[in-house]
Image (cartoon, grey):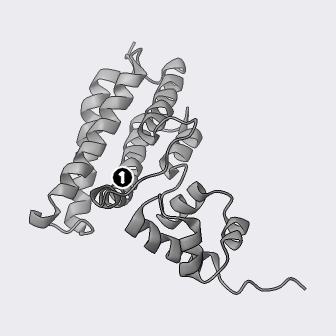
Amino acid sequence: MARIPRITNQQILEAARQVFLQQGFGASTLEIAHQAGISEASIFKRFSTKEELFFAAMGIPEKPLWVSELESLCGKGDLKENLIKVCLQIMEFHREVLPLIVMLRSRGNALPEFRGKEPRPMQDVKALTAFLEREINQGRLRSCDPQTVAHILLGSLMNYVFVEQISIPTTELPLNSGDRATEVSTFVQNLVDIVWQGIAPSQD
């Protein structure tokens, strides 16, 4: 009979999160193991790399939900509505991740290096660009530069979240309020409406 682990993955992640928030990615896995009350080897039996442990502990998915959503939406349904849906998911992702990144940076803490990979924002641009390019090839969008459109959408969404975060002390609406959700939804709808005027397929 397999031995039941004395500590759960969640307990390890909670310990790792505490240490990473204090010291950033530069924290040693030995210290995390000490915090969790286990051996360092036990960590790597559960998590293959320090990077994997960091992203799991900080609640940052290596592949955001919205990127997976793009793969399932290509060529299907109402494209404008799909863009609104994806943009809302992008907004939600950055609203969750940006405060963590800002917190770590403000403390002078290190983040994982992108060894052999492009920085996350450039990966996002490429993913959205590829999606738009496939839609153009299928005649669901007019001929345009998909990378520029991707930059416009992602840049606008990230800027909205950034302004929202730095305005928290003086904002009148809590970030999780119903009115704020409506405000975000309206912004995304208006953003896609404006962009759509330049990329909508030509009506023969």
Query: Where does the C terminus fall, quadrant-wise?
Result: top left
Is 1 located above or below residue 69 in the figure?
below
Observer able to see residue 172: no
Is 133 located above or below residue 73 in the figure?
above
Q: Point out residue 56 in the picture as x, y percentages from the top left corner.
A: 54, 63
Is 204 located above or below residue 30 in the figure?
above
* Circle 1: element type: helix
Lateral position of residue 29 relative to residue 161, left or right: right
Local packing at callout 1 (Cα closer than 10 Å; few below 14, some 14-19, many 20+) is many
Q: Point out residue 50 in the picture as x, y percentages from the top left corner.
A: 59, 58
Q: Residue at x 32, y 56 (%)?
A: 108
Q: Which residue is drawn at 49% across and 45% down?
A: 113
The image quarter in which residue 48 lies = bottom right
Q: Which residue is drawn at 28% across and 52% down?
A: 185
79 or 19, which is in the foreground? 19
Tally of numbered discs: 1
91 or 191, which is in the foreground? 91
Q: Point out residue 62 in the picture as x, y percentages from the top left corner.
A: 54, 51
Q: Point out residue 105 in the picture as x, y percentages from the top left corner.
A: 32, 55
Lateral position of residue 151 relative to residue 183, left or right: right
Q: Mark 1 points at which residue?
A: 94
Lateral position of residue 58 relative to residue 50, left or right: left
Query: Where does the N terminus fall, quadrant-wise?
Result: bottom right
Observer able to see residue 153: yes
Q: Residue at x 55, y 49 (%)?
A: 63
Amino acid at the residue labelled 1: His
Lateral position of residue 44 relative to residue 1, left or right: left
Residue lying at the far right of the rendered structure: 1
